[in-house]
Image (cartoon, rainbow, N blue to C red):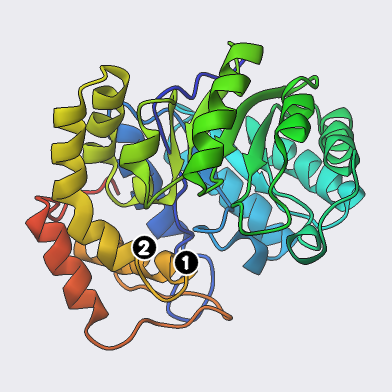
Amino acid sequence: MTLDLRGLVPAPVTPFTEDGSVDFDAIARLGGWLASVDGVKGLVVLGHAGEGTFLTADEQTAVISAFREAVESRIPIIAGITGEGSKVAALEARRAVDAGASAGLVYPSHGWLRFGFQPGAPQARYREIYETSGLPLILFQYPDATKASYDLQTQLEIAGQEGVFATKNGVRNMRRWDTEIPVLRETYPDLQILTCHDEYLLHTMFDVDGALVGYGGLAPEPLVELIKAGKARDYRAAREIHDRLLPVTKTVYHRGSHMEGTVALKEGLVARGILHHATVRSPLLPLAEGAHQEIADALASAGLSSVTARA
């Protein structure tokens, strides 16, 4: 059965204890809270926001299992599949299945970010992962600024392969978005199209089935409403939510590096009462002094106060 991710799909952070170990008690709080929000359709763990590539293989499978337990199987857990080589990624996907993942978000081979990819290589990567694991897969479109951003024909060929049921598009080039998304939609009407433009949600919200964003792990309530407004073609309502969230967007995502967004998300979750501290793993570093208060103030201005998390 194809998963229905038509709604909000948060990509939550991976909490750590202050000594740097995976914090399973915090995963229980975070996962339980997100699963309790009406409109959340699944969680993507081990992505960029989840510091997935900073974890050992054993930690990765433990995090998948812990989030699945936290949500009490009410919503599916999707695993980021990030291994460099296709065989490595395929075996990673198989471990994810064993740990309880219901689908996989396939990252490009990271060497492609700098050097580009050979024609047909992305298609072969998806094929090998699916044939090895049987895991339903999400096509991940990287930003246009990288050499791992797939041209339209490559996207179409991947989307047409067995096992691929959705696409997470983060091209961050609105010209490409406005011309390529309609073609994907027309060619594959059943393909679930999910935006991952945390900082461009307003522009992309009217063309998609949902949003797969790290932002959803911090502010799920207004993002669920934003998706509803987009599907209703209610620009005024969508704009109001966007503007209310803009201070949060700026303090979390308008930073020197997009990677700092992960640290900012953790600081925001401290302000919301889910995490006790914002510990990250190297090579991530803490934010500059004063950032926590800026993020907390922005959340308060958007009406996002502390929540009562499930234990």
Q: Quadrant of the N terminus?
A: top right
Q: Is residue 272 visible?
A: no
Tell me the residue that label 2 is attached to: 253
Tell me the residue that label 1 is attached to: 258
Q: Where does residue 176 sit, x and y in percent of width and height?
A: 56, 39
Q: Is residue 27 visible?
A: yes
**Upstream in sequence: badge 1 or badge 2:** 2
For this rendering, which residue is in front, 271 or 204?
Answer: 204
Whether label 1 touches label 2, CB < 8 Å: yes
Secondary element under disc 2, as helix, strand or loop, is helix
Secondary element under disc 1, as helix, strand or loop, is loop
- Give the residue type that dot 2 points to: Tyr
Q: Where does residue 69 sit, x and y in percent of width and height?
A: 49, 39
Q: Where does residue 60 sit, x and y in percent of width and height?
A: 65, 55
For this rendering, which residue is in front, 308 or 253?
Answer: 253
Give the residue at x 17% y 67%.
296
Query: Residue at the bottom extreme?
Result: 289
